[in-house]
Image (cartoon, coloured by chain):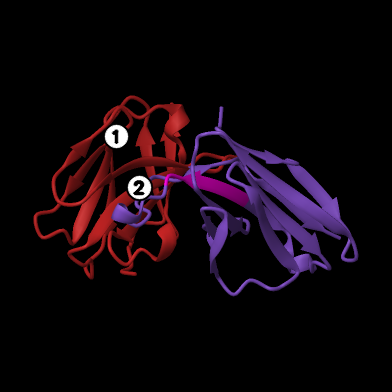
Chain colours: A red, B purple
Amino acid sequence: DAKTTQPNSMESNEEEPVHLPCNHSTISGTDYIHWYRQLPSQGPEYVIHGLTSNVNNRMASLAIAEDRKSSTLILHRATLRDAAVYYCILRDMIYNQGGKLIFGQGTELSVKP
Amino acid sequence: DTEVTQTPKHLVMGMTNKKSLKCEQHMGHRAMYWYKQKAKKPPELMFVYSYEKLSINESVPSRFSPECPNSSLLNLHLHALQPEDSALYLCASSHYYLRDRGLQPQHFGDGTRLSIL
């Protein structure tokens, strides 16, 4: 599976937008980009996923670069509850080996009041 | 509230004990997973079950024995564990359709925090 690179940590202020970057320069044409987050003392939680086009849902937006070598998870108004570790994960839609998720180190997001 | 329920939430056991972790979901998911997470590290896959059959074992030591008695339940039987096995054990489930090869989002429980004395 192709690897992803994320900053170890980021800080944001409450009620401001947050842009969480992810680099995946070796992404293949059959890799989907998935984001999960893990709040303190909880299991990971699915956030969003996409292939080529930008995606929006009630939790976040996913902006994918035209060459697909990078993507950005956008939280439009950060709240204290958004403080978590955010994982960017590539999942091959053909050779997915049974659906497993391979987590990288992720970005620890802290939100200041 | 999580839709995947794991019990117990905490477990302390000695190296000679036998115990089991339990995971339950009622979302009709036919794929279930066990992950292990050490402190300050990302989760690592241990096992995958698809339609109650073991499909992936990530070279996990035999002191961990998974079992999927039906489509809603997943167990992890523990025997003769080592102190380095102390970790958070996470269960997850998802729909599994051959057409999209397991791209369905996974739903995680909040884990069992295991301590080996």
State the residue at coordinates (39%, 45%): B105
**Residue found at the very far left of the displayed protein:** A66
| Tag 2: amino acid | Trp
| Tag 1: amino acid | Ala
The reply to whether the magenta stretch includes residue B92 is yes
The image quadrant that residue A47 belongs to is top left
In the depicted view, which residue is nearer to us: B113 or B52?
A: B52
- Magenta-highlighted residues: B90-95
Cβ atoms under marks 2 and 1 closer than 8 Å: yes
Marks 2/1: CA–CA distance: 10 Å
Specify whether disc 2 shares its chain with disc 1.
Answer: yes
State the residue at coordinates (51%, 46%): B93
Quadrant of the rendering where the C terminus of chain B is positioned: bottom right
At mark 1, the secondary structure is loop
Residue named by callout 2 = A35
The numbered mark 1 sits on a residue in which chain?
A
Using the image, tell me which numbered label, if any, was put on residue A60: 1
Count of all numbered marks drawn on residues in the image: 2
In the depicted view, which residue is nearer to us: A23 or B63?
A: B63
Q: Is residue B116 left or right of residue A13?
A: right
**x, y (%) of residue A32?**
26, 55
